Image (cartoon, grey):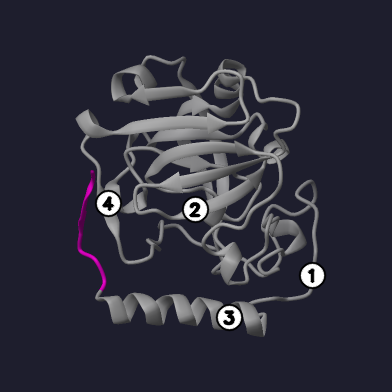
Amino acid sequence: MAEDKDDLPQGARAKLVATKERWAREGRLLTGRTARPETERLPPGQRRVENWPVLDLGVQPDVPLDRWRLEVDGLIEHPLSWDWATFRAQPGFRDRSDIHCVTQWSRFDNEWEGVSALHLLGLVEPKPEANFLMFTSYDDYTTNVPLMDFADDDVLLAHSWQGNSISREHGGPVRVIIPKLYFWKSAKWLRRITFIAADRAGFWEERGYHMRGDPWKEERYG
């Protein structure tokens, strides 16, 4: 098991979650605008930042590389279990993309390296009834994503950012990167990917956040 250090006190964590739930109920940060990524690089209501803010639930799992595992299961023909050496032996994939956080910040031109989602899908072969994925992290965080959004040519399981290993605070050793959705969908500290038939809410989705999370449609809340 990973070691969890620097946890927020339970009361502080509960307060943080309650604040985000209230934001969802109140529709905080919503502008009522929509846009198209072909015409506007910055989605409605977002502001550009140069740094990379750290946001989490108060737990930053410490996952040693020799104990890291990725399990892929559910509605697929070929379930798999990768250790770190197997993960790094997969064909490398590099991409540059922007990221958009539901808390209104966006960061342009992030350089990622990892394993492409299309490569993973080719290995596991989703069954016809698989329509969604559920990501599970080493801190037990979960989030749901439509298979059609995961199966895009800019999606990857990333181990590096800007030429360096992704730090623990940003979700290393491996995090998901789905540039076309709000960043809460790009699960940190990835541990499991489960293919499912029907959509199922993850951690924030159960607390009022949108089931899909398209930034240009401003799908912050459901």
Per the rendered image, the range of residues in magenta is 1-8
Please state, as top left, top right, bottom left or bottom right, where the C terminus lies in the image.
Answer: bottom right
Alpha-carbon span between mark 1 and mark 3: 18 Å
* Crowd around label 2: few <14 · some 14–19 · many ≥20 (10 Å): many
Q: Secondary structure at mark 4?
A: strand
Amino acid type indicated by mark 3:
Trp
Alpha-carbon span between mark 4 and mark 1: 37 Å
Residue at 47% x, 81% y is: 18
* Crowd around label 3: few <14 · some 14–19 · many ≥20 (10 Å): some
Amino acid type indicated by mark 1:
Arg
Residue at 45% x, 38% y is: 192
Q: Earlier in the sequence, mark 4 or mark 3?
A: 3
Q: Earlier in the sequence, mark 2 or mark 1?
A: 1
For this view, does 91 lie left or right of residue 216?
Answer: left
Q: Which residue is mark 2?
A: 142
Q: Which residue is mark 1?
A: 33
Q: Looking at this view, is 95 or 66 the one in front?
A: 66
Report which quarter residue 103 is drawn in: bottom right
Q: Secondary structure at mark 3?
A: helix
Q: Secondary structure at mark 1?
A: loop
Alpha-carbon span between mark 3 and mark 2: 20 Å
User: Do residues under tags 4 and 1 come within 8 Å of each other at their CB atoms?
Assistant: no
Q: Looking at this view, is 121 or 130 the one in front?
A: 130
Q: Which residue is mark 3?
A: 23
* Crowd around label 1: few <14 · some 14–19 · many ≥20 (10 Å): few
Q: Which residue is mark 4?
A: 61
Residue at 68% x, 37% y is: 147
Q: Earlier in the sequence, mark 4 or mark 1?
A: 1
Of the residues tagged 1 and 3, which is closer to the observer? 3
Position in image of residue 194 (x %, y %): 54, 37
- Queried whether the magenta region covers residue 6, the answer comes back as yes
